[in-house]
Image (spheres, grey):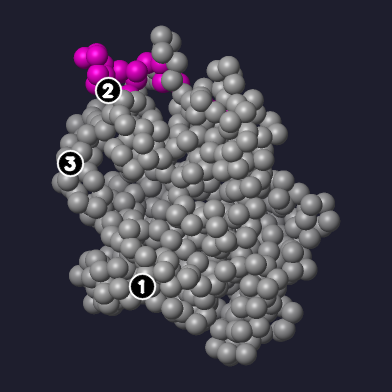
Amino acid sequence: MNEGTSERKTEVLVVGGGLGGVAAALTAARLGRRVVLTEPTGWLGGQLTAQAVPPDEHTWIEERYAPPGYAELRRRVRDYYRRNYPLTARAAADPLLDPGLGIVSHLCHEPRVAAAVLEEMVAPWRAGGQIELLLGHEPVAAHTSGDEVDAVTLRDPRGHETTVQADYVVDATELGDLLELAGVEHVIGAEGRDETGEPHAPDVADPLDQQAISWCFALEHRPGEDHTVDRPAGYAHWRSAVAPFWPGPQLSFDDVVPITLQRRTWKLFEADHARGAHFPLWTFRRVLARENFTDGAVGDVTMVNWPQIDYWEAPLLGPGVDDAARTAALAGARDLSFSFLHWLQTEAPRPDGGTGYPGLRLRPDVTGTPDGLAMTPYIREARRIRAELTVTERHVGVQARPEGAGSEVFPDAVGLGRYRIDLHPSTAGRTYVDIEAYPFQVPLGALVPVRVENLLPAGKNIGTTHITNGCYRLHPVEWGIGEAVGALAAFCLDRGLPPRKVRNDPTRLADYQRLLTDTLGVTLAWPEEIRTHRE
């Protein structure tokens, strides 16, 4: 039941409090603009916090090539542990402190710590009134006139609705929700090779070809104790069903190497722990490592975001996917995660010949939820704007570029990124697409919709393809996109210009890029030896 309505007016409305949304809000506020920032969950941070995914980062992240605000976030996370945790002297003195010593990143940490740090970063701007934060608010309608979005209506859990009018609207939602609500031209799923010319695209477009989602959770191990969860309703299905592209049921330690698609078998704990070697699942995304803390005060905690919980049976978006179908898909992803945990506790093979690790215990405090699963699923793919410039595999993919050419040099660059083109198995029955990409730039053209003048994307909804989304979707790139968008909104408000006129006027574009580099400290170009770097 609706319990009333209210109205707000601001200069910049940011809908979605993930990394891109927070970066956009902080940047616009820093540049003197009033911002309303909304988020459907109780935590800022999106994939880093509410989705419980430790950061995936590139080789040069500790250098000047990280987005400035993202570098600050990383410094603050390390300082949080130094201030509050019983670190060993060695760990406390390490300038590159890594709380979890996980394989995926050199800064693996708890999602709740990142949420606390992001609250700290926003706090002074909230106190000064530049940022108003509305947690627990989800967009339900967009109000448009012509080629502009005038306002967005948001609803809180009590049914109260708030309509926010804004000069600029930033869609930082996880699924690109405002694109649908506001009728912004967009793409869902995979484009066809006949449209993009990408070597790894399917022959024809398939809107139901979307990357698997994963409902992550936090675990610790207490040998000798029994923390077995109840057998989930779908356990028998996950224990026996075999996808055509998978070596066996998901409730196993078997999967495929994403690059070669060869079968492999994981171990939970026992393996060579050296970075780069075949490592155990436990250390893959470990966020607390016992050896970093004094006298056993803190034990190991790992985040389960492993191939075994990739849910590919049904998409969240596209033709025929209504609210009921989306709800069923989300329930299926949760059931898969609980089923995999139950299998780990009861049937997983152990090196001693026995089965099951009943001492595996969920850590709801780490995820901020009653049951230990993340607040929301890990979303790898969203609706994407039809943009003035769409980044394709031919701009960044090693196989699709001339030999040794490096990535495309974009004259309208607004940031940097680095990640493989990494697509998880899809809802269309496709296996991994994992191919090498050069270190790349984020072009302004990918942030400008083809028609709408005052809506800007700040997440996985930018002008990439299904293929290039695979390398533009991770933590530091999303933050950098948000910084560019927040600065663009402020720049356009200062000059009374729409974003496309900034991009298409060389003088205004140069002024905007100087704002990014000279005022905000953003680096817009890789050195040649990095731009052409191969793994």
Residue 348 is marked as 2
Task: Residue under label 3, please give it.
Answer: 263
Residue 248 is marked as none
Residue at image coords 25%, 69%: 399
Look at discs 2 and 1 and give the one toward the viewer.
1
| Label 3: how many Cα within 10 Å (few below 14, some 14–19, many 20+) | few
Q: Nearer the viewer, residue 233 or 404?
A: 404
Q: Nearer the viewer, residue 336 or 306?
A: 306
Where residue 495 appears, as percent x and y from the top left, is: 72, 84
Q: Earlier in the sequence, mark 2 or mark 3?
A: 3
Where residue 249 appears, as percent x and y from the top left, is: 21, 35
Task: Residue under label 1, please give it.
Answer: 406
Q: For the residue labelled by badge 1, is the local secondary structure a helix, a strand or a loop? A: loop
Considering only vertical position in the picture, is 52 above or below 231?
below
**Image quadrant assignment for residue 278:** top left
Q: Are marks 2 and 1 in contact (CB under 8 Å)?
A: no
The region drawn magenta spans: 344-365
